[in-house]
Amino acid sequence: MRFLPLLAAPLEGHGWGMPHDASLDGWRIDDLINETSLYVILLFVIMVAWMLWACLQHGERHPARFDHGTSRGSITVALGIAAAIFFVVDGRLLVNSILVWNHVFGNFAWAETQPGVVRIEINAHQWSWAARYPGPDGKFGTQDDIVTLNDVTVPQGVPVIFQVASIDVLHSFNIPNMRVKMDAVPGMINRVWFVAKETGQFDIGCAQHCGANHYKMRGVLTVLPREQWERWSAAASANSAVAYDPEDKDAHWAWDWEKHARICSRSIRSRPASGSSTCSRATTR
């Protein structure tokens, strides 16, 4: 009876067996996964039924008929089935994925212009996550920067944008409860963002094997109410300023945020964005 736990109720996510979704837009990822699973199950059932029919219909009493499959009818049936699967299954998933990316997860122009947006640089290395926030001056790489290790604290209800890089090998910045995962690639800056709808603590993991201690590369994401986060960030910035050492060059790993932000990149939106924008184009979501 060891298989019974497999039949237990699903976890708290929007889909079967998904981790609890604590993000505003995570349900969109769950819907894409659920839709993909539904198509896979449907195609599996059709193929099994087809094979059972073939086994029952083409028994010993059924005369064999050799066919190269090159007749017009055979080619038409094969192309028709392939086209139906491609356009109905793959085509729908492709279109839905592109729309979700353009409207939400790839819409950095909207996220960058929201009031209270939080920007964080993540520098991955074997085997930990270094995080850097700008201090009160709003700039990265200055004395008042907040610098943490394996500990990311963000406010609830506002966009949190990460720029992710790696100092050594390929890693993958993964927060399952926020439905975000982004590769950390040496020599490249990648971006990802989310809005946390719930407070609490959530795991940060590495989803790319990165060496012998890959399994130890764990961090903690803490989501606080906005006012509480403001107090935390003020205290953390003050502590970082006290510990700042201008001679410690290795600790000054920040990069130019705006160089990689590309906030005026083309994006599709569906509702007006609040707050001012530095882009000349309209920004809506």
Image: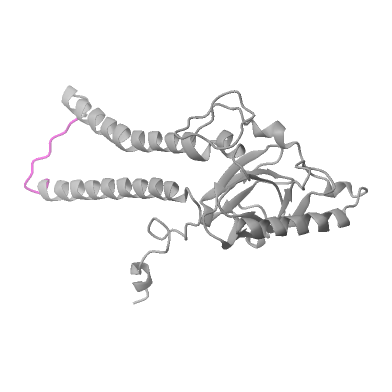
Pick the quarter of the image with the N terminus.
Answer: bottom left
Q: Quadrant of residue 215?
A: bottom right
Q: Position of residue 261 (x, y in %)?
A: 66, 34
Q: Position of residue 139 (x, y in %)?
A: 77, 41
Q: Residue furthest left?
A: 61
Q: Residue furthest bottom?
A: 1
Q: How is the image coloured?
A: one colour
- Residue at the spot x=35%, y=69% of the render? 8
Nearest the viewer among 123 and 241 is: 241
Question: Magenta span covers which residues?
Answer: 58-67
**On screen, residue 82 above or below 254:** above
**On screen, residue 269 above or below 116:** above
Main SS category, magenta section:
loop
Residue 229 colored in magenta in the image: no
Specify whether 172 is left or right of 140: left
- Residue at the spot x=26%, y=33% of the render? 84
- Residue at the spot x=82%, y=49% of the render? 144
